Image (tube, rainbow, N blue to C red):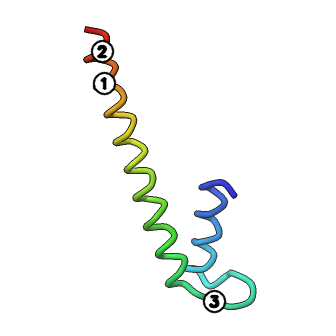
Amino acid sequence: MTLEQLQNWAQAQINNTAKQELRPDIGISVLELVDELERLQDYVKELESKLNLTTDS
């Protein structure tokens, strides 16, 4: 499952358009986790870029 698919699933939970059991709380938690993952991925890229700058010097 891709992050986009996970986000779509979570949004369906929040919007109460999901099939079977409706759990908007799970959808909200998943979206928060995806946001945190994206923030951490950006931070890793920033650190890698700084590391490359120092090793190139």
Q: Residue 57 at what x, y percent from top left?
A: 25, 8
Eyeballing the image, is 2 above or below 51?
below
Considering depth in this image, is 18 or 43 the residue closer to the camera? 43
How crowded pointer 1 is (Cα within 10 Å; few <14, some 14-19, many 20+) is rated as few
Residue located beneath label 1 in the image:
51
For label 3, the residue is: 22
What percent of the width, then of the height, locates residue 11?
58, 71
The three-letter amino acid code for the residue at tag 2 is Thr
Q: Nearer the viewer, residue 18 or 35?
A: 35
Q: Quadrant of the N terminus?
A: bottom right
Q: Is residue 9 left or right of residue 19?
A: left
Circle 1 SS class? helix
Residue on which disc 2 sits:
55
Q: Residue at x 60, y 79 (%)?
A: 13
Mark 1 touches mark 2? (CB < 8 Å):
yes
Dot 3 or dot 2, earlier in sequence: 3
- Any mark on residue 11, and which? none
**Callout 1–callout 3 Cβ contact below 8 Å:** no
Quote the CA–CA distance across marks 1 and 3.
45 Å
